[in-house]
Image: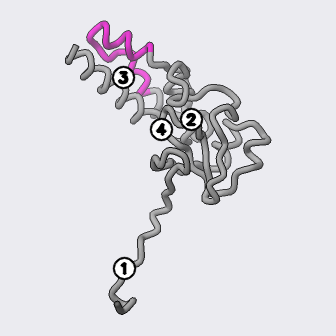
Amino acid sequence: MNKAFVREPDDTGQSTCPRCRSLGVAVHEATLAAHLQPAALEELADPAWFCPFPTCPVAYFDLFERVATVDSFIKPVYPKDPTAPICPCFGFAADEIEKDLAEGGVRRTRALVEKAKGPEAHCSTASPTGQSCVAEVQRYYMQRREGNRQE
């Protein structure tokens, strides 16, 4: 077949975890430096990605399939450790969402979402993905709310 008619794959800038094949979340060097022990940090090249799959032992990986494992974290991070704060900027953990659900409201969750939009949030270094926690907080809330309705 003539190569003029063969479409080359698009380079989306995304990569998959070499262990679990989950789509990684691109991270900056500042994010890596804030979360990894120095020895693990030295092993990764730029660009690097966070593996968001909760039970995968890989924390971060690079294009050369080198990995930093969960035990390389300076401190526990969500979702790798479900007891760690979902929002590390403000220490907001899953138990806060559980309290809202038990009360049938969203007071704590809504307050966190508003705070996370403000200047006090430092997601680029506090979050293991370098991104805002708002989507993850909302996802967790909705999953738990749906789970409670089915019970």
Bin the neighbour count of mark 3 within 10 Å (Cα to Cα): few under 14, some 14-19, many 20 and up. Answer: some
> Based on the displayed image, in which of its 4 quarters is residue 129 positioned?
top right
Image side of residue 120 versus residue 64, left or right: left
- Alpha carbon of mark 3 to alpha carbon of mark 4: how far? 26 Å
- Quadrant placement of the C terminus: top left
- Alpha carbon of mark 4 to alpha carbon of mark 2: how far? 15 Å
- From the viewer's perspective, is residue 42 above or below residue 12? above
Over which residues does the magenta segment extend?
95-114
Residue at 33% across, 87% down? 5
Q: Which mark is residue 127?
A: 2
Task: Name the spot of residue 25 as percent of width and height, x first.
Answer: 50, 48
- Alpha carbon of mark 3 to alpha carbon of mark 1: how far? 46 Å
Q: Which residue is mark 4?
A: 53
- Point out the frontmost of discs 4 and 2: 4
Q: Which mark is residue 7?
A: 1
Please state which of residues 119 and 109 is positioned toward the viewer in this rendering: 109
Residue at 47% across, 38% down? 53
Callout 4 touching callout 1 (CB < 8 Å): no
